[in-house]
Image: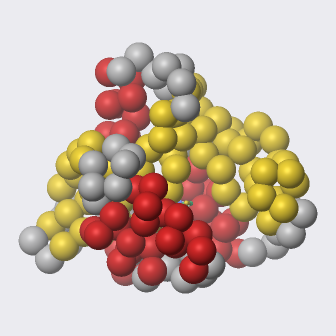
Amino acid sequence: MSFTITGPHLGQAAVCIPIVRSLPEWFGIEADIVHYAAAIDHLPTFLAGNPAGAGGFLSLKQHNPYAAEVYVMGVRRECQRTGIGRRLLQDAEAWLRSQNVEYLQAKTLGPSDDDENYARTRAFYLAMGFRPLEECMQIWDAQNPCLILIKRL
Ligand SMILES: CC(C)(COP(=O)(O)OP(=O)(O)OC[C@H]1O[C@@H](n2cnc3c(N)ncnc32)[C@H](O)[C@@H]1OP(=O)(O)O)[C@@H](O)C(=O)NCCC(=O)NCCS
């Protein structure tokens, strides 16, 4: 399956939320999905698509002129580990650099939680050049340690 990366686009929640819903091991809380649905429409979003549909997406949130965040991303399970996440991130990073953005952060479940799925997510971010900055219990809650990762663009 070959995918073309396009973006950034706005108004892509209808394309992205079915991918989010197809990954319940990562996105299992309905309130979070509703939040993402509202947020994604307003966020610059990169899509991995082919004639059969979208295989993955990445939505960015820019916090200030210097720093942005991978707000949410997902690749359909059957397409994972084929390089789509890497290509989505590469295109998002190139676009941010063209906007003179200097830092990209990501937040994900930290290593204090032994969830194997999020261990794979952390492996992805590490392989993509992100480095763990801090695990914080106050951003989400004590049951959901939040690992902040950062990358110099
Ligand atoms: C995390 C995610 C976006 C990665 O996308 P992907 O298309 O599967 O990743 P890629 O194929 O581009 O992987 C790039 C590199 O990351 C690392 N990596 C990716 N998945 C990994 C895994 N399961 N275990 C170990 N390393 C992994 C590898 O180094 C890989 O390179 P390689 O395949 O040449 O060894 C995808 O797996 C996903 O959607 N996960 C569920 C949702 C999620 O975690 N979203 C992010 C938090 S919001």
Task: Note whether 153 is above or below 44 in the view shown.
Answer: above
The image quarter containing residue 7 is: top left
Q: Is residue 126 visible?
A: no
Left or right: 40, with 46 as reference point:
right
Outermost residue toward the top?
Answer: 100
Left or right: 59, with 52 as reference point:
right
Q: Position of residue 38 (x, y in %)?
A: 43, 61
Is 34 in front, or is 87?
Answer: 34
Q: Is residue 146 visible?
A: yes
Is 84 in front, or is 36?
Answer: 36
Q: Position of residue 41 (x, y in %)?
A: 34, 55
How are the residues colored? secondary structure
Outermost residue toward the left?
Answer: 51
Q: Kindly identify the residue that appears in the image at 60 percent across and 62 percent down.
A: 121
Q: Kindly identify the residue that appears in the image at 52 percent across and 72 percent down.
A: 33
Q: Kindly identify the residue that appears in the image at 50 percent across and 56 percent down.
A: 72
Left or right: 135, with 99 as reference point:
right
Q: Position of residue 147 (x, y in %)?
A: 75, 51
- Count of picture labels: 0
Q: Quadrant of the N terminus?
A: bottom left
The image quarter containing residue 95 is: top left
Is 20 in front, or is 94?
Answer: 20
Q: Kindly identify the residue that appears in the image at 32 percent across and 21 percent down.
A: 98
